Amino acid sequence: MEIKADWQGGLSFVSQGESGHEVLMDASRKAGGEDRGARPMELLLHGLAGCMGIDVVMILKKMRAEIKDLEIQVEGKRAEKHPRRFLEIAIIFSITGKGLNDNNVSRAVELSHTRYCSASNSLTAEIITDYDYKNTD
């Protein structure tokens, strides 16, 4: 999987992935940005919610539950000092439907978190950096 992020000036970037969808990212005005898009750290939480949500829906459907509503609240607590990484991420699933019980909902959430969700299981990935540049002086 690959994405490409293009600088839009200031602290703003537009990224596009293999799906063809674009995402606008920017820093807050307080941080020197123009507040034109989502913050990168917010997008990390969006990805986690979407990944686990998709898994939970698929797993519960296999358990023959009928989901009428699913809301996922994700809260990330960040370090005060740079790099201001997430120290803790809490995910709360609020599910309404038929055929739900503590066992199948608990199992679906656990399976997503520990086995199926690529996002949650990637948060400990080794990150390898590289660069190139062209001096225009």
Image (cartoon, rainbow, N blue to C red):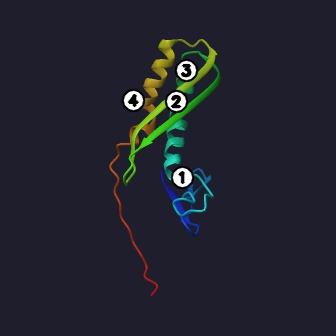
The residue depicted at 59 percent of the width and 22 percent of the height is: 95
- State yes or no: discs 4 and 1 in contact (Cβ < 8 Å): no
Q: CA distance from mark 4 to mark 2?
A: 11 Å
**Residue 10 picture location, percent across and down:** 56, 68
Q: Find out whether the residues at labels 3 and 1 contact each other: C-beta distance under 8 Å.
A: no
Q: Between disc 2 and disc 3, whose residue precedes?
A: 2
Between circles 2 and 1, the one closer to the viewer is: 1
Q: Residues within 10 Å of mark 3 (few under 14, many from 20)?
A: some
Q: Nearer the viewer, residue 108 or 29?
A: 29
Residue 48 percent location from the top left of the image: 49, 39
76 left or right, relative to 128: right
Q: Which residue is mark 3?
A: 60
Residue 120 location, quadrant: top left
Of labels 2 and 1, earlier in sequence is 1
Looking at the rendered structure, the kind of residue marked 4 is: Thr
Classify residue 24 as left or right of residue 2.
Answer: right
Quick one: label 4 or label 3, which is nearer the N terminus?
Answer: 3
| Point 54% across, 16% down: residue | 63
Q: Which residue is mark 4?
A: 114
Quadrant of the rendering where the C terminus is positioned: bottom left
Q: Secondary structure at mark 3?
A: helix
Mark 1, residue position: 39
Q: How many C-alpha atoms fall within 10 Å of the one at disc 1: few (<14), some, or many (≥20)?
A: some
